[in-house]
Image (cartoon, rainbow, N blue to C red):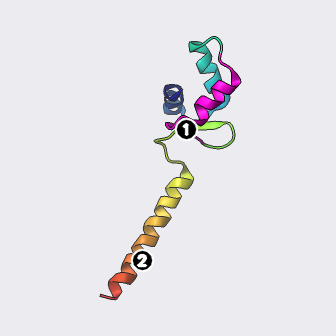
């Protein structure tokens, strides 16, 4: 499942729709129950949800996560500057 999501993401650089994952898994397995399919997506640490019905490799940061990292870095720098002013 991870390999499928990673390969599809590399091709498009976009979140992978669940329908496309289901089509790809059908090439390898003739039958997979809906519950097994959803559990393999939900509990796989190498895949993360990117909204309803879309998935990304866990190693990929979403835009919101990137923005949060930038905001945290700016806030850390401000705090560091304030603490430096006391020394």
The answer to whether any part of residue 14 appears in the image is no
Residue 55 against residue 84 in the figure, above or below: above
Judged left or right of residue 31, residue 7 is left
Viewer-nearest residue: 18 or 38? 38
- Which residue lies at the image location 42% right of the left edge and 71% below the top edge? 76
Q: Which residue is mark 1?
A: 56
Q: Position of residue 52 (x, y in %)?
A: 69, 41
Residue 85 against residue 50 in the figure, above or below: below
Crowding around mark 1 (Cα neighbors within 10 Å: few <14, some 14 to 19, many 20+) is: many
- Which residue lies at the image location 62% right of the left edge and 31% below the top edge? 39
Crowding around mark 2 (Cα neighbors within 10 Å: few <14, some 14 to 19, many 20+) is: few
Viewer-nearest residue: 46 or 50? 46
**Residue 12 shown in magenta:** no
Residue bounds of the magenta highlight: 32-49
The numbered dot on residue 9 is none
Judged left or right of residue 57, residue 42 is right
SS assignment at label 2: helix
The N terminus: image quadrant: top right
Q: Position of residue 49 (x, y in %)?
A: 60, 41
**Residue 44 shown in magenta:** yes
- Which residue lies at the image location 63% right of the left edge and 11% below the top edge? 30
SS assignment at label 1: strand
The numbered dot on residue 79 is 2
């Amino acid at each position: 499942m991870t390999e499928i999501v990673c390969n599809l993401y590399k091709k498009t650089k976009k979140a992978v729709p669940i329908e496309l994952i289901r089509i790809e898994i059908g090439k390898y397995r003739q039958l997979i129950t809906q519950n097994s399919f959803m559990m393999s997506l939900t509990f796989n640490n190498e895949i993360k949800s990117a909204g309803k019905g879309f998935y990304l490799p866990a190693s990929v940061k979403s835009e919101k996560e990137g923005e949060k990292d930038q905001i945290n870095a700016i806030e850390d720098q401000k705090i560091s500057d304030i603490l430096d002013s006391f020394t």
